[in-house]
Amino acid sequence: MLPTWMIFLFFLGDGADEPPLANRPPAFSGIVGQMTMALEASPTKVAVEEPITLRVHLQGKAAANYQPMRAKLRLFPEEISEDFFIEDVSTADTIDPENGKWSFVYKLRPKHSKIRMIDGLRLAYFDSIRRRYQLLQGDPIAVEVGPAKKLDVEIDPAVWDRVAGSFFELAQVDRVLETPPSGLRWRPTLVVVSLLVPLVSVVLGFLTRFGKASFKRRQGRILSPAASQALEKLRATEELEASAEILVEFLRERLDFRGIEPTACELESFLKACDVEKRIRALWSDWFNRCHVATYSPAGAHAVPTVSEAKTCVESLDFALNRQLSRLGPFSILAFVTLVVAGWWSTGIGHAEVAPSNQELAVRAENAFRMGREAGRNWSQARRAYQQAAKDYYELYRRGIRGSGLFQNLGNAEVLLDHWPAALWACQCGLKHHPNHAFLERHRDLLRQRVDTSAVRSPTSAWSAWVESVGTWALVVCTPMGIWLGFRVGRSPAPWEAILFVGVLILPAILAWEIFAGAEPLQPAVVIRNGTPVLTGNGDSYPRHASFSSLPAGFEVVVLHRRGEWLQIGLPNGEKAWIPPGSAWAVE
């Protein structure tokens, strides 16, 4: 017979992976399993503010819901912030849970020259076999930190001396928030509008032509199905009681009347509550009043209501209800639109109170940039200021701001942070929205000299040449002409109008085919990660490309296709390849 503790563990099974709260260390990294940790740093000889790439390699077996994740790792002690700036490089992480391997990359920038080693890294995890928390200590890594160096630029000194000072220039807030000029170039949206709007006008013309019946009904000249059915039954009977039952049934279908044998007063009150005009209420109450009198009085003593009068009651009430509904329709739509707009407006106001406005964000970024510039040789303080400025400028970019000053200031901040690929990307984005901008062109050419781009760059567009030559004016002329002809074709088609309408739609149709069924537009991008692997497929299991095994940071490529977060690019030799997610930023 098995011991009690073995039976307990047998039934506990995988459920035992849940780490207990008791004795849980504050630096618990959310890992359950068995782990080993190894540290790797390069280079180990740097100057103050120069980056040291630290790779944390974890290997072992972890439970499915408690695997190593960057967001949960608590590797660094609190006192390390006194010696290093720590930056996450999540794009360089390697995650391979099937083989039990995880690698996380960080950049450590020394704050002073007294640092002799990287020490104190530890990993707290829960051992699922020993059923207790374990603490792994990383081996110390010896480093040599020298005094801070001046900004080193590996380009022509004459060129640098002429333009290096411009990296400290700051564009004003109005240039940051300016709207890019919209040239008269065709866009896919305009092509779609030029094709679809004329077709919609055909439908409107068709509805105008064949919707006369509903128009007449709204004007009270055509009966509803309930009224037509009631009149058909009245024509088939001459009995007074049957006519009264038919009228009550009509009221039940049209106005949800609940009575069975109503009196004249009850009908008067009900129709008044339904907002029926007084003349029609009097007609109905008079018919039912005479019907009751004729039913309970001697024959011939009073005038008996006729079936034709009952038909008049049905027709008059039905026409009045149709006119009433036609008047309420637009008001109901207007009320609905008002509620939607009011809700959208109130939501916008709520968001505006939470987040700072674009103006406030631009001013805050400008002040941070100025603080970094005023810090001078105090690179620790300057770096923090430039990082804050870049963060705010990226937030403005995310909000849709595309001013030339935004890309100028963002590029300058990234240069001063030694993020050359990101600065090149900012210049390219600025030139996309502000072509021939002298400042951005000069900085772009300067930054390109920083990167090994000896290979020929791919073209920036794959549209057919004739598509590029088509101007906006051709589509602007086709659109109103197509709307006018489409409405005429829908109402009363004439042969010459139909032929002309088809001819007007030929140009937008061909352009739409080129856009959506032809070659995809190629989007420029800038490689951000240095040593980006170039693979033959969209997965880490694919082999490296034979011609280009890796790409340097700052290399400019063109995106051919996207599959998830993987990008297919065109190589300078005409071949295609794939790069991992986060390796390049698209120029947008």
Image (spheres, helix red, strand yellow):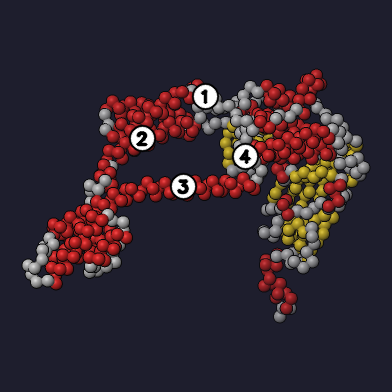
Of the numbered discs 2 and 4, the one sitting upstream in the chain is: 2
- From the viewer's perspective, is residue 254 above or below residue 557? below
- Residue 338 numbered tag: 3
Residue at the outermost left position: 300
Seen from the viewer's position, the closer of residues 488 and 191 is 488
Residue shown at 79%/22% (left/top)? 160
Question: Tag 4 or tag 1, which sits nearer the N-term?
Answer: 1
Amino acid at pointer 2: Ser
Amino acid of disc 4: Arg
Residue on which the image places disc 1: 184
Q: Residues within 10 Å of mark 4 (few under 14, many from 20)?
A: few
Give residue 584's position: percent from left, percent from top: 66, 36
Q: Earlier in the sequence, mark 3 or mark 2?
A: 2
Earlier sequence position, callout 1 versus callout 3: 1
- Quarter of the image that includes the N terminus: bottom right
Separation of marks 1 and 4 at Cα, in angstroms:
24 Å
Q: CA gap, disc 1 to disc 2?
A: 26 Å
Q: Which labelled disc corresponds to residue 400?
A: none
Residue 295 image position (x, y, % from top left): 14, 70
The residue nearer to you, when weighing 188 against 518, is 188
Instruction: Indicate the position of residue 577 as horizontal and vertical percent values.
Output: 62, 35
Disc 1 residue type (three-letter): Leu
Local packing at callout 3 (Cα closer than 10 Å; few below 14, some 14-19, many 20+) is: few
| Residue indicated by mark 4 | 399
